[in-house]
Image: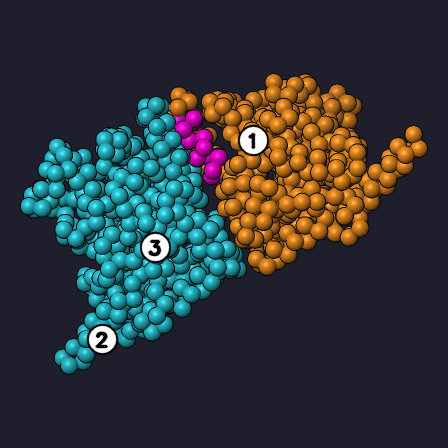
Chain colours: A cyan, B orange
Amino acid sequence: MSIKTANQETLRGLTDGQPVLVDCAPAAEAFGLADRTVLHAGPPLAWDRACATVQSALCCAVRYEGWAPDDAAAADLIHTGAVRIGPCHHQAAVGPMTGIITPSMPVFVVENRAHGNRAHVTINEGLGKVLRFGANDESVIERLRWLAREAGPILGAAIRATGGIDLRALMAQAVRMGDDMHQRNVAASALLARRLLGPLARSGADPAALGRVADFMGANDQFFLNLAMAAGKALTDPCRGIADSTLVVTMARNGTDFGIRVAGLGDRWFTAPVEMPTGLYFPGYTAADANPDMGDSAIVETIGLGALAMAASPSVVRFVGAGGFQDAVRATEEMAEICLGEHPHFRMPTLDERGTPVGIDIRKVVETGITPMINTGIAGKIPGTGQVGAGVARAPLACFAQALEAFAEGRQGKMKN
Amino acid sequence: MSIKTANQETLRGLTDGQPVLVDCAPAAEAFGLADRTVLHAGPPLAWDRACATVQSALCCAVRYEGWAPDDAAAADLIHTGAVRIGPCHHQAAVGPMTGIITPSMPVFVVENRAHGNRAHVTINEGLGKVLRFGANDESVIERLRWLAREAGPILGAAIRATGGIDLRALMAQAVRMGDDMHQRNVAASALLARRLLGPLARSGADPAALGRVADFMGANDQFFLNLAMAAGKALTDPCRGIADSTLVVTMARNGTDFGIRVAGLGDRWFTAPVEMPTGLYFPGYTAADANPDMGDSAIVETIGLGALAMAASPSVVRFVGAGGFQDAVRATEEMAEICLGEHPHFRMPTLDERGTPVGIDIRKVVETGITPMINTGIAGKIPGTGQVGAGVARAPLACFAQALEAFAEGRQGKMKN
């Protein structure tokens, strides 16, 4: 297949798949996550290379599952391999920031109805001391237990009663309402809450429990982020393995490495040291408090959202410290230089209905030296600090250079055969 | 007081009041709407001068209340004065399009906590055959009965349980999300639904009834319009009577006349024949099907929303057939020429956080000849047709010229004394 044809096929997959929210169920049940396994964000990561924030979250996850009484014992289990760790991305899942998933955690299930594959993601925990930012005290574990005991089952029942919620349509509407779907998800979160209002009301669940779930969802403007990520995972997974395509299908970070995967290069990761985001810090914090960039959330940039959709989201550009409206437009225009196409569904009213740029081509990245921008939350580097700011990170050029080299080698190999 | 000082006081009232949604209750109970009374939109209107759409809605309202068995008998009751009709605006109320309110209809109650006054508005009926567009068959009456029997009480209980919902904050957020709050209210509607999710869940109401109310709210992207109108009414009423102020505090239409009221000119209406909106028609309809402009909804333009906030709402500019993003910016800039200030709370991210223009000054309107634009729904002129399109209407210049003349006469009178 020609690269051009292959890339068109990938682009169709990235943009015309049909991610539908169909369930919320424990990870063990939803995608068979094995006992004594903890998933994390980004490319594969050995315990010794993990940053303190990720290590802290991994230990908390082990304690949450009751596999160890304290962090030292938890670390030992991971170190000896008695508890296995591995990337979410290897198991049809994604996770924000530290990206922790364990078997008993409830996960949203997003089915790509154009392909039949599914993707999974945890329920967003909200702000403050949360596992995804490496907090690991009792309050974190208590919230995780409540999510598993009460919120997950109630949300699952309501979602199943809908027969499936079309996330592409919901996200397209939210982009029209100023969400970039990475650092700003207030529109999508509110649209989802409105969509679930009826099914939740009819669920017959205990009013007090229903009220707690409703308040939890309603208080979190980033509630939808995880679902946008699962939609991205559901859309990109079928594109992994489209031979001869140079489009990026994964961007993910684990706090140590930034990794990408490319449609035509299958399951192989191309990694480089992750960079620091630049942005705005919450009161009391500075760049010195920041952890290097983390999380699977960059999957949303892979499908034309986040920083690529900056022009659609003039509110987010200030939040991430990237200037004003014209800077937002410039960011989207810069990203268009490294993308193959414009999104047929995610349209920007501020640019007279142009689609967001989508389909990052490793050839264009290497040729122009323009690296993908990512709208990201900034975690504190001391475990338990939580989020200290929001900003823009750049994917390291080295990942794309390596991938292009591997791609070229593959083509030469094929020609020889 | 100098005009300048008076206008600054009015501007503060228009922008810094605190509209809070506190209840939903029958109009008779909420603001003492008298038996055998039907309120309508716009300035005062005699039955004989009402357009067919308004007459149809008035008759339907009389039948809904059980005061007459058919339209002929209903018309007779109104004609003889056995049923009184009068403007919503004279009773601390507002209504969209035909603007009908009768004593048993549930109304939202919005309290302006900066002044203690309250404003009232019906629950938005949704699209299709609805009373506000002059439809008057049994399905219309059945929906009105359901609103009174089931939706009103459930919404009232949930709203009371919140202790009050700050509408100014919610509207400011929705403006950031692309609502003009007149022809586009999807963000505000979804934010309100999310806010009510918890209180509704905890209400303990019958799950099936709760489900019907949730579905009804969730299916209507214009659900919030009526609340924006009540917020506008609650903010503008205390400004009526600020001596020496030339700012507009009411703009309203009844399908026959366009009327304005001015802060410094008390309760006096200045009217002129209402104009036809220009815009886009739904499939199957043309300008020949359109009713002249109608409704109290132009109150939102009076507080700096609707067409005045067009630049914040690049999606609405297409819906009302007013061009693209740059046209939206130009519309807001044109409106700024006739306004005293910029809104301190309703900020437009597309214009780098500038506030929407607010405080229409009759002197500036007459001096420039620029008349206020209004983003409006277009009703069919044949009763029962419903909405046939959406567009932009202009307030007639004559209203402002008359008001300015009256203002000048008043000043001269004072100087003589």
Q: CA distance from mark 2 to mark 3?
A: 31 Å
Q: Which residue is mark 3?
A: A277
B194 in the magenta segment? yes
Q: CA distance from mark 1 to mark 2?
A: 64 Å
Q: Does any portion of residue A24 appear in the rendered image?
A: no
What's the magenta region?
A: B190-201
Image spot of residue B130 (x, y percent): 59, 36
Check whether the beta carbons of the residues at disc 1 and disc 2 lie within 8 A of each other: no
Same-subunit check for callouts 1 and 2:
no
Disc 3 residue crowd, few under 14, some 14–19, many 20+, Cα 10 Å: many
User: In the depicted view, which residue is nearer to us: A188 or B412?
Assistant: B412
Q: Secondary structure at mark 1?
A: loop
Q: Residue at point 24% right, 60% down?
A: A273
Q: Disc 3 is attached to a residue of which chain?
A: A
Q: Does any portion of residue A269 appear in the rendered image?
A: yes
Q: Nearer the viewer, mark 1 or mark 2?
A: 2
Disc 2 residue crowd, few under 14, some 14–19, many 20+, Cα 10 Å: few
Q: Disc 1 is attached to a residue of which chain?
A: B
Q: Which residue is mark 2?
A: A408
| Amino acid beneath label 3 | Pro
User: In the depicted view, which residue is nearer to us: A327 or A191?
Assistant: A327
Is residue B46 shown left or right of residue A233?
Answer: right
A305 in the magenta segment? no
Q: Which mark is residue B123?
A: 1
N-term mark: 2 or 3: 3
